[in-house]
């Protein structure tokens, strides 16, 4: 497995985790991470955009033959 694939899978897990937090746990996030939530508030649009960008990079890696 190449370093590009490893970085992609780490970013994919992060993007999925961000979407889970935004859609299901934003109150928990705001309560437990008060300081961070002031700088990075949970926003559905940005989380979905982040996931779409990561999936696009994954498709590019797959076409290049470096993903699997």
Image: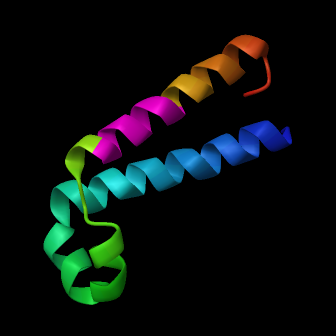
Q: Is residue 6 above or below residue 31?
A: above
Determine whether 25 is above or below 9 in the image: below
- Residue found at x 37% / y 79%: 36
Return the residue found at the far top: 63
Residue drawn at point x = 77 percent, y = 14 percent: 64
Outermost residue on the right side: it is: 2
Q: Nearer the viewer, residue 38 or 25?
A: 38
Helix, strand or loop: magenta stretch: helix
The quarter of the picture where residue 22 lies is: bottom left
Image coords of residue 53 (percent x, y) = 48, 31
Work out whether 65 lies above or below 6: above
Which residue ends up furthest to the front in the rendered image?
Answer: 39
Percent coordinates x, y for residue 23 in the rendering = 18, 54
- The residue shown at (85%, 38%) is 2
* Residue 32 quadrant: bottom left
Q: Which residues are magenta?
A: 46-54
Is residue 47 inside the magenta stretch?
yes
* Residue at far left of view: 27
- Which residue occupies 28% across, 62% down? 21
Horizontal and vertical percent position of residue 19: 31, 51
Viewport quadrant of the N terminus: top right
Q: How many marks?
A: 0
| Left or right relative to 54: residue 47 | left
Most foreground residue, 50 or 3 = 50
Q: How is the image coloured?
A: rainbow
Q: Position of residue 12 (x, y in %)?
A: 53, 45
């Amino acid at each position: 497995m190449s370093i590009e694939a490893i970085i992609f899978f780490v970013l994919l897990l992060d993007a999925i985790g961000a979407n889970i937090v935004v859609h299901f746990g934003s109150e928990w996030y705001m309560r437990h991470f008060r300081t961070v939530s002031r700088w990075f508030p949970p926003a559905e649009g940005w989380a979905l955009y982040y996931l779409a960008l990561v999936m696009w990079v994954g498709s590019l890696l797959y076409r290049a033959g470096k993903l699997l």
